[in-house]
Amino acid sequence: MGSNALLWIGFNLFVVFMLALDLGVFHKKNHEVKVKEALTWSAVWIALALLFAGGVYYFMGTQKSLEFLTGYVVEKALSIDNLFVFIMLFGFFKVEQKYQHKVLFWGVFGAIILRALFIFSGVALINKFHWIIYIFGAFLVYSGIKLIFEEEEKEIHPDKNPLVKWIKKVYPVAENDEKGSFFRRIDKTLYITPLFIVLVLIEFSDLIFAVDSIPAILSISNDTFIVYTSNIFAILGLRSLYFAVSEVMGLFRFLKFALAGILAFVGVKMCISGFFHIPIGLSLLFILGSVVVAILLSKLFPEKVEESK
């Protein structure tokens, strides 16, 4: 067995072990995740990502290590948009806080599978049809411009989602479920619960966001292992990030401008890749700097109460 295969097997076994440890030990019982616990887990996931980057540096060199870190930061920044969707979905379906971690856990598990399919197909397409990288680049520039001109607040109506309507037609839906399960048996008939619908919508929203984030990371590296691991590390820490920042979303008032700039930057990087190479270190500095500046500006110029209402 080659060393490359061992890397893939080892990393995926690590992911399975951490997920099993998370759900089977630390979150065996449903409970409300406090900010302190969330911050601790966020620190753990970031530390693990940095340790992994150190391993990449030792075994694969500086370039691959920088590619991993840049991909990780890009995915982490772009995934913050997911947090707003999580908040709206949990609020709309009135999901109790003690059940939110369970929904996000299985949401992340499904996202890992979907992201893997996206990454492998994206790398394969670029390797076979290199010109497609320019299409990806143009799409990212368009996404960045579109993000700037989007309305500040968009109402989300999950009950009007075609996917939700289809689910309700195919499967009977229980009115409520006090045990926080995804399925409920009533009079020998299996019902799905509102919690299951929330899970499906979270998976669907991640699929939509992946359309932006995967091409963005493919602009940084064409190494499938680096793209995959950086993406998965960012996704694994998404649950903790949600619980850590859900109460302080005001810090991200100007984040959409940073995200728009990042999308446009990586899009241009892809479009000019055949003529000019932007150093990966410069890309990492630009991406980190954009996020930091956005948070500092949000802190210096907080949203007014009248505006937020």
Image (tube, rainbow, N blue to C red):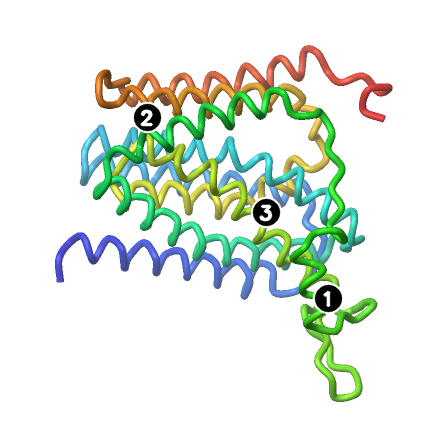
Could you tell me which secondary element the residue under label 3 belongs to? helix
Could you tell me which secondary element the residue under label 2 belongs to? helix
Graded by Cα atoms within 10 Å as few (under 14), some (14 to 19) or many (20 or more), the crowding at tag 1 reads some
Residue identified by numbered label 3: 205
* Distance (Cα) linking label 2 and label 1: 42 Å
* Distance (Cα) linking label 3 and label 2: 25 Å
Query: Residue at 69% of width from left, 30% of height from top?
Result: 249
Q: In the rendering, at what x and y percent does residue 287 appear?
A: 43, 21
| Above or below, comparing residue 80 to residue 261 in the picture | below
For the N terminus, which image quadrant? Answer: bottom left
* Distance (Cα) linking label 1 and label 3: 18 Å
Residue identified by numbered label 2: 270
Graded by Cα atoms within 10 Å as few (under 14), some (14 to 19) or many (20 or more), the crowding at tag 2 reads many
| Above or below, comparing residue 123 to residue 262 in the picture | below
Query: Residue at 41% of width from left, 17% of height from top?
Result: 286
| Above or below, comparing residue 194 to residue 45 in the picture | below
Asked whether, in this view, residue 308 is left or right of residue 111, the answer is right
**Of 229 and 143, the residue lying toward us:** 143
Of tags 1 and 3, the one toward the viewer is 1
Query: Mark 2 or mark 3, which is nearer the start of the sequence?
Result: 3
Asked whether, in this view, residue 37 is left or right of residue 264, the answer is right
**Residue at the bottom extreme of this rendering:** 188
Residue identified by numbered label 1: 168
Q: In the rendering, at what x and y percent does residue 238 appear?
A: 54, 43
Does the CB distance between marks 3 and 2 fall below 8 Å?
A: no
Q: Amino acid at mark 3?
A: Ser
Q: In the rendering, at what x and y percent does residue 38 appear?
A: 61, 43
Query: Residue at 62% of width from left, 58% of height from top?
Result: 200
Query: Mark 1 or mark 2, which is nearer the start of the sequence?
Result: 1
Could you tell me which secondary element the residue under label 1 belongs to? helix
